Amino acid sequence: MTVNAATQLAPIEKIAEERYVAPAKPSLVGLSRAQLADALGEIGVPEKARKMRVQQLWNWLYLRGAKTFAEMTSVSKDLRAALDQRFTLARPEVVAEQVSVDGTRKWLLRLPSENPGERPHEVECVYIPDTVRATLCVSSQVGCTLNCSFCHTGTQRLVRNLTAGEIVGQVMVARDRLGDWPEGVRPTDGVLPQGDRLVTNIVMMGMGEPLYNFDNVRDALHIVTDGEGLGISKRRVTLSTSGVVPMIERAGAEIGVLLAVSLHAVRDELRDVLVPLNRKYDIAQVLEACRNYPGASNARRITFEYVMLKGVNDSIDDAKALVRLLKGIPAKINLIPFNPWPGTKYECSDWDQIEKFSEVVFNAGYASPVRTPRGRDILAACGQLKSATEKLTARERMALRAMAMQDED
Ligand code: SAH
Ligand code: SF4
């Protein structure tokens, strides 16, 4: 298939439908310590007592996974009652859960609709366990601001940024469902990783462009990586971007997690079509931002994602150009078999071609550029999320694995 750049240029971005209206009784999940202190101020807790109360709430929420104020026994009864009147500890509501025999779980989450009569928004969150680790694939937006031509999420009309609470809430939901709290009961269906922790890694690779929702993603990831709470190390959190250049440096400086960049093409003419944002920030600018990414090193490489599209970007020349392009950048390459969706004009590269492409990349020193599927019955995928009832093909499983495991050394 050939792609004619001149005739297929989609608009770069959509206007976000910013319709979020905070519920009358908001959840404390996802509030920073300062915001929690303000919340306590609202219900009359004197200033000098707030710091200690914040610490108590933080522990109950993020170390013990409290779902009700009633169980917060170290907090006075009066304060619990006052909190209960004004706030909740709600996380997004799980409306469907699918568990595969290999332990992969997909949760369809419903967010409250803001306007009467409006259909509630839904996002998905996927849990992918391995033997010693388990990765949670988290969404940052309902839909996506951008219009990548090979991405199903990109075709969705509706866009709304998730709040920090809705992003942290995905991690809370996962740990709730896995019984991954001190007194939690672990599920007996499906495989879980060995070790104490059931969610060891986070990838911001679900729906949405995280750098178009910078503040909320940053605030959420601060909570997710907070050593006195959810405590997932920054080295185990990867943020994937399609190349929002002005925000890449800020992501490094203000969030400090690992970076993945959706490159997908080695020529601007093609990347303009696949990732229309390229018309704003071209390949050279994206790579320059990567070179300057704070904290990138051989130990903390930037992952370059490259979706394998038959006859579009999968030639051996492309592979060679990819290797040349990334010279000098501490990089990993992650080849993702394209996951087709109804109506797409693209096809996944043939397996032979993926292997040839991957050999070029491998010979240039990039370990395991493409991963083979391990699971048998996975019902979930990141970045290419499908309706809760659809099962995935072997090809799709491979794409899922490749993306979820991209931060593996
Ligand atoms: N918006 C961010 C993160 C979410 S998408 C980004 O674009 O990086 C996560 C990854 O899935 C990206 O590399 C994206 O290009 C890839 N992806 C999207 N749709 C896909 C599909 N149908 N098949 C394979 N990979 C896909
Ligand atoms: Fe958005 Fe990423 Fe899909 Fe592009 S690939 S439309 S940035 S979710």
Image (cartoon, grey):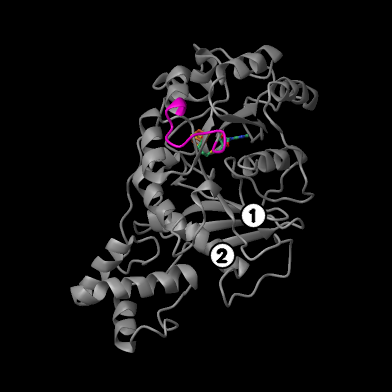
Where disc 1 sits, the SS reads: strand
Q: Which of marks 2 and 1 is nearer the N terminus?
A: 1
Q: Is the magenta stretch mostly helix, strand or loop?
A: loop
Identified at 33% across, 52% down, the residue is 20
How packed is label 1: few (under 14 Cα within 10 Å), some, or many (20 or more)?
Answer: many
Residue at the limit of the structure toward the bottom, as seen here: 77
Tell me the CA gap for discs 2 and 1.
12 Å
Can you see residue 149?
yes
Q: Name the residue under label 2.
A: 175
Identified at 68% across, 48% down, the residue is 390
In this picture, is 320 found above or below 385?
Answer: above
Can you see residue 155?
no
Look at the image and say whether residue 293 sits in the magenta stretch.
yes
In this picture, is 249 found above or below 204?
Answer: above
**Magenta span:** 290-300
Q: Which image quadrant is residue 72 in?
A: bottom left
Q: Nearer the viewer, mark 2 or mark 1?
A: 1
In this picture, is 339 found above or below 100?
Answer: above
Left or right of residue 15: residue 226: right
Left or right of residue 264: residue 10: left
Residue at the limit of the structure toward the front, as seen here: 298
Q: Name the residue under label 1.
A: 134
The amino acid on which the numbered mark 1 sits, given as a three-letter code, is Ala
Location of the N terminus (image quadrant): top right
Q: Nearer the viewer, residue 49 or 100?
A: 49
Q: Where is residue 144 in the image (x, y as percent from the top left)?
A: 46, 39
Identified at 64% across, 25% down, the residue is 346
Which disc number belongs to residue 203?
none
Location of the C terminus (image quadrant): top right
In this picture, is 260 found above or below 110?
Answer: above
Q: Nearer the viewer, residue 360 or 398?
A: 360
Q: Which image quadrant is residue 270 in?
A: top right
